[in-house]
Image (cartoon, grey):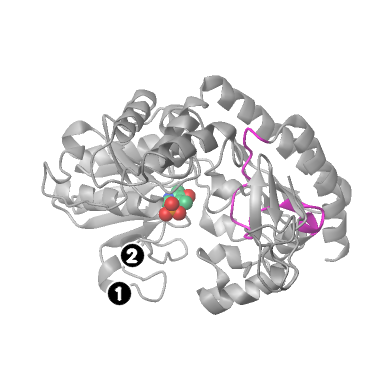
Amino acid sequence: MASIPVCVPGECEAAGCDPVVCTGAGMPSNDRFFERSTEAIPGGVNSSIRAFKSVGGRPYIVARAEGAHVYDVEGTEYIDLVQSYGAVILGHAHPAITAAVQSAATGGTSYGAPTPREMKLAEAIGERVPSCEQVRFMNSGTEATSTAVRLARGYTGRDRVVIFHGNFHGATDALLAAGGSGVATLGLPGTAGVPAGAVAETMVVRYNQVPELDESVACVIVEPVAANMGVVAPAPGFLAGLRAECDRVGAVLIFDEVITGFRLGEGGAQAKYDVTPDLTTFGKVIGGGLPIGAVGGRRELMETLSPLGPVFHAGTLSGNPLATAAGLAALDHLDGDVYIELMARARHLAALLRDACAAAGFPAHFPVVGTLLGMVCGDVPAVVDFDGAKRTDEAAYGRFFHAMLAEGVAMAPGAYEAIFVGLAHTDAVIDEIADRAHRAATAAAASA
Ligand SMILES: *Cc1c(COP(=O)(O)O)cnc(C)c1O
C-alpha cells in the first residue's frame, strides 16, 4: 500500500508519481510539507493538538491510511492508535465505508433537502439508544454540544449550564470555561476570544462529584466516561446521582457521547451504566470517519427545536449524504459481538503495555473502561478527576510518544488522549504494538 512517493522537478508525469503527495518541486518530506502548511494554515494544522506542541517536534503528514496503518508523505508506515480520535472504529478506508461513500457520491454530495439516508441513520441510532426517540444531525461534535445546550436552555427557559473540569465538549464558547482547582467557578473564559459574558452562566465543577443544583440550572453536560483527560471511569453512583439531582431541580441531563457513543457498546455509556439522559450528543463513530454530529433525546424535548419549536437550528450540510452513508455502513458493522471483541482487545493491549513498561522500568498505567484505553505516565495514583489527571508526567509521555513514533507506532500527540483500539487492531497488530512498546519504553526510560 505504501507506494514510494516520487517527485522529480519537471518530471511529475513520471510513472509512480503520487498526486496526493506531489509537491511539484522535489521529493515530499514531512518537514517541507509542514513548513509549507504553516505558511497557508495557522500553525500548519486544522485542530490544534495535531501540531505536536505538547510533545514537541513536528508532525508527520499523512498521505493515506488503510486498516490499522497510516502512511506519511515520505512513505513511512505507522501502526495508528489515533484512528481519527476514535472516528474510524472499523479501521481506515474500510471497504464497506469506502463503497458506501463512493456510491453516495455518485448520487450527489449535498442537496439542501431531506434524504432517505438521514432518516435511516436517525432510526438506526434510535433503535440502539432508546433515549433517542428523535435525532437531529449536524456536522461535528462541537455543533452537537452547542445545539444541545441551546435546546436545554430554550426548553427550560433557564440560562445556567454545569460542566465538569477536564471534560471536553468541542470548541463552543459557552463550554470553553476555565475550571478552578476544587472549587466551583463561574464565568472564567477558558481561552482568549471567549467573552466573560459567554461563560457567565457556565459553572465548572469537579468530575465524579455530584454537585448540588438549584432551579437556575438549565442543564448539566457530562462525558459519562471522561476520555479527554486520559480515560476516567464514572465513580459508582456518579451518573445516577446526576440523574437524580437534575430531576430534583428540573434540569436537563446531557450525556456527551461523542466519544463513547457506539464505542463503549451499541447503547453507549448510558446502556453500560444504566442511566438515561434527557439528551445525548454524538459525533465521531456515527459518521464512519466523515464529518457529523447529532443530538438525540425524548420526542417532546427534541420537538423544541425549530421548525416545530422556538429553538433555532440549521445547517447547509446537515444530514449530509456522504456522512450519513458512511455512518449507516459503520453502524451496520457494529453489533454486540464486536464490542465484546473490542473490550477483550483493549484489556489485552493494556496488559501487554503494562508489562512492556514495567519490564523497561518506565512507570505508567493503562486504565481500561470497557473498550476505552488510556495511558497515565508517572508514579501517580489512579485518576478520578482533573486534578488527578494533571499529575500525569507529561514530559515522560512526550518521550514515550516519540520513542513509539520512531518504532512506527502513532499515538495521539497529547498526554490526555485515549489510545483508540478498533476492529483493524487484530491480535497480530496488538502483539506488534507490544513489542515496539517494550523497545520504546526502554528508550524513553533511558532518556529520562
Ligand atoms: C471530540 C469531542 C467533541 C467535539 O467533536 P468535534 O467533532 O471534534 O467537534 C465533543 N465532545 C467530546 C466528548 C469529544 O471527544
From the viewer's perspective, tell me whether residue 196 is left or right of residue 382: left
Q: Tell which of 6 and 57 is nearer to you.
A: 6
Q: Position of residue 33 (x, y in %)?
A: 65, 70
Q: Position of residue 141 (x, y in %)?
A: 40, 50
Secondary-structure class at tag 2: helix
Marks 1 and 2, the one that precedes in the sequence: 2
The answer to whether residue 59 is above or below residue 230 is below
Q: Quadrant of residue 193?
A: bottom left
The answer to whether residue 133 is above or below residue 217 is above
- Label 2 within 8 A of ligand 1 by Cβ: no
Per the picture, the main secondary structure of the magenta-coloured stretch is: loop
| Disc on res. 267 | none
From the viewer's perspective, tell me whether residue 105 is left or right of residue 443: left
* Residue for badge 2: 173
Secondary-structure class at tag 1: loop
Residue found at x 40% / y 61%: 171
The answer to whether residue 177 is above or below residue 38 is above
Q: Are marks 1 and 2 in contact (CB under 8 Å)?
A: yes
- Residue 168 visible from this viewpoint: no
Q: Quadrant of the N terminus?
A: top right
Q: Tell which of 416 and 3 is nearer to you.
A: 3
Identify the amino acid type marked 1: Pro
Residue 372 inside the magenta-drawn segment = no
* Residue for badge 1: 195
Residue 423 inside the magenta-drawn segment = yes
Circle 2 Cα neighbour tier, 10 Å, few/some/many (<14 / 14–19 / ≥20): many
Identify the amino acid type marked 2: Asp
Q: Quadrant of the C terminus?
A: bottom right
Q: Report the span colored magenta.
A: 403-424
Q: Position of residue 212 (x, y in %)?
A: 30, 49
